[in-house]
Amino acid sequence: LSKEKFDDYLFASDICILHKMSTGNLAVVSSTAFQALGAGCPIMAPSRSDFFKAFENVLIKYTGTADLNKTLSGFIGNKNRLERYRKNAGEFLNKNSPENISNMILSAV
């Protein structure tokens, strides 16, 4: 999908499930998760996946199929949980904004 089409799907979705599992000892990052966070769509991901280590407090984690179903049903329609998620995601995006990251790098030099 193009970035625009992906964003269209995210804006129309209640939640995005990124089921990417671990890859062993490789250092990995999910750029898709950053894109989805920027669109404001809640994200669910496997708790054991290396792809989402950088997103500890901003993703909704699940351990397996049963937990995925339970967590998903407890999240959809729960406005308080959605607001907490959006607040955490906003804080994460602000903290990791290009401006803040570049300022951290420049201040370290």
Image (cartoon, rainbow, N blue to C red):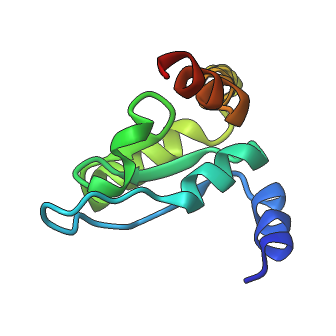
Q: Quadrant of residue 94?
A: top right
- Residue at position x 51%, y 33% in the image: 58
* Left or right: 72 as drawn, with respect to 98: left
- Residue at position x 55%, y 21% in the image: 104
- Residue at position x 80%, y 63% in the image: 7
* Left or right: 40 as drawn, with respect to 62: right
Q: Quadrant of residue 21?
A: bottom left
* Left or right: 93 as drawn, with respect to 30: right
Q: Position of residue 39 (x, y in %)?
A: 77, 49
Q: Could you say which is closer to the camera, residue 32 or residue 69?
A: 32
Question: Above or below — where is 74 with respect to 29?
Answer: above
Question: Above or below — where is 54 with respect to 63?
Answer: above
State whether residue 92 appears in this view.
no
- Residue at position x 83%, y 60% in the image: 12
Question: Above or below — where is 105 with respect to 6?
Answer: above
Residue extending farthest to the bottom is 1
Q: Quadrant of the N terminus?
A: bottom right
Q: Position of residue 20 (x, y in %)?
A: 37, 67
